[in-house]
Image: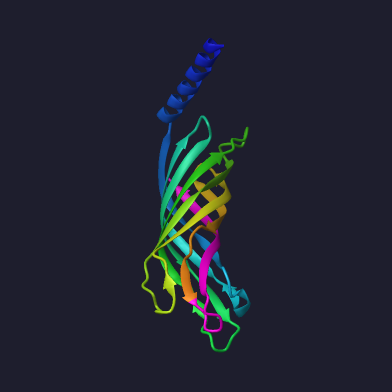
Amino acid sequence: MKSYKKIILTLLVAICTMGVANAQFRFGVKAGLNINSLHLNSLQENFDKDNHCGYTLGVMTEFQVPIIGLAFDLSAMYTRMNSDLDSTVPSEEDVAYNKNFLEIPLNLKYKIGLPIVGSIITPYIFTGPSFAIKLDKNSLDAIKTKTCQVAWNLGVGVELVKHLQISGSYGFGMNNVAEFTGLVNTEKVKVKNNYWTVTAAWLF
């Protein structure tokens, strides 16, 4: 039994070593659109969410291990996120969350090799964290926004002709991005931001 374990372990080490030796580093450019959705912990009856389209653009690098179909990608993106909370109470102000960020997503990908057409089209799934560092200052003293927004992404994509990657993902907000106190109810309102993102990247 021990000999079988040694053989299996040796094979796994050999496969991983061959994969790292054949690993590919690629760089490219990426751009896309996002739609944000703000979520409140309370006072939801006093606000109507108004989601808007934003955009993202930047550079990307990918590290791929061909044999096992795994890849990692890291991006540095200038991202604009637009959302509003429209107050249904006349005495309360509308809350705008229109911010510029330096967004850094890090994803683990699994590429699904297809026979015959693999060199033309390769679907993949991916997941990983995204860190968005706010580039703006607070516009209103009553609304405190966080410097860093953290989300966890889940997505799917397709790679065409080994260079063009088109993907869609949903980011689950993991921390509060803003806080404010309502005038009707003095309870502190905490806001999280979830968002859809669709991007296209060209890797060289």
Magenta-highlighted residues: 181-204
Instruction: Please check the rendered image and state whether residue 50 is part of the magenta-colored stretch, yes or no.
Output: no
In the image, what residue occupies the spot 53% across and 85% down? 92
Q: Residue furthest bottom?
A: 90
Residue lying farthest to the front in this orientation: 186
Scheme of colours in the image: rainbow
| Foreground pick, 162 / 128 | 128
Q: How many marks?
A: 0
Residue 135 image point, x, y percent:
37, 67
Residue found at x 47% / y 71% = 179
Of the pair 185 and 152, the residue shown nearer to us: 185
Q: Residue at the location (54% across, 57% down)?
A: 171
- Left-right relation of 43 to 98: right
Measured along the vertical axis of the image, is residue 159 above or below residue 193?
above
Which residue is painted at 36% across and 73% down in the image? Answer: 137
Say which quadrant the N terminus sits in: top right
Image location of residue 51, percent across then percent down: 57, 71
Which image quadrant: the C terminus? top left
From the top left corner, tell me how far across and down residue 183 is, in percent. 52, 84
Tell me if residue 110 comes above or below residue 84 in the rendering.
Answer: above
Is residue 199 located in the magenta-colored stretch of the structure?
Answer: yes
Q: Is residue 191 above or below residue 142?
A: above
Query: How far from the left and from the top, in percent, is residue 146?
Result: 41, 66
Q: Main secondary structure of the magenta part?
A: strand
